[in-house]
Image: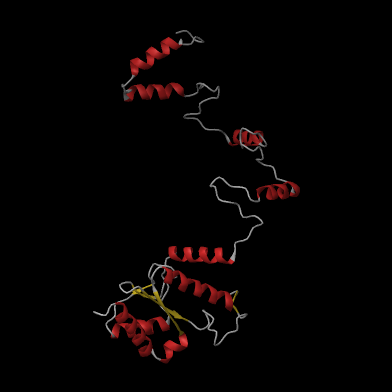
Amino acid sequence: MRKGQRHTEEAKLKNRLAHLGKKDTEETRKKRSLSHIGNKNGLGNKTWLGKHLSEEHKKKISLARLGQKNYEVNGMFGKHHSEETKRKMSLARIGNKNAVGNKIWVGRHHTPESKIKIKTACALTRVYNQKDTKIELMLQEALRKRGINFVKNYNIVGRPDIALPEYKIAIFADGDYYHANPLKYDKDKIIFGKKASEIREYDNSIIEQLNEKGWMVFRYWETEINASTDVIVAEIQEEMRYINPNQ
């Protein structure tokens, strides 16, 4: 075929059928690769296989691309939106859906109930590698002495400090400060950036969710655990016998 001539559609079809199921040899691939060096491809751009652009050439190409749509789809490469444009874009996004399909929450707020659900869901995926607190260790030791098997930080709603899955009993060892003991702290007391009332509301929601799933929940304050672990374990054993009288 002479230079500048093209195959007919019929010839292209015959050529494809003739090569169907065949594989090029290593020698053929090598020849084809070498023949491309410096030649022009179908788009009219030089194929730079085996070649390198100089730094000056790279700089010229970069400067030439500034603001061109074929380089950055939105044509904003090297440019900046004005404050007015940014404000309009922000307002336009309110309530719209992004590519994932979730609502963009610009200008919106979660309800208290929604916040609790999100916090609870996140807690289930959290990796627990923290050390047991002093009062948790005290309860664990008291249960071991009575021969009661338990699981720490069981993977259910609220991540109970101690759980007896066989009996569906969840036990929480609550620090007086961290969980805002009402006998010590007023409802408006700020603890780690939250009101004491908000902390208690969250803890109560955990109890409700576990109850709905058929779990019996015991929450003990730090002062109660320090006073007597024997009384606490006796209460837990009584519940175990109520759930399963044969054990």
Q: Nearer the viewer, residue 245 or 155?
A: 245
Relative side of 86 to 149, left or right = right
Q: Quadrant of residue 195?
A: bottom right
Q: Is residue 97 above or below residue 25?
A: below
Q: Nearer the viewer, residue 7 or 88?
A: 88
Q: Is residue 147 above or below residue 151?
A: below
Image spot of residue 242 (x, y percent)? 31, 80
Q: Quadrant of the N terminus?
A: top left
Residue at the outermost right position: 84
Relative side of 94 to 40, left or right = right
Q: Quadrant of the C terminus?
A: bottom left
The number of numbered discs placed on residues in the rendered structure image is 0
Residue at horizontal 33 percent and vertical 72 percent from the top:
165
Q: Nearer the viewer, residue 176 or 34?
A: 176
Q: Is residue 5 above or below residue 236?
A: above
Image spot of residue 43 (x, y percent)? 54, 23
Relative side of 149 to 138, left or right = left
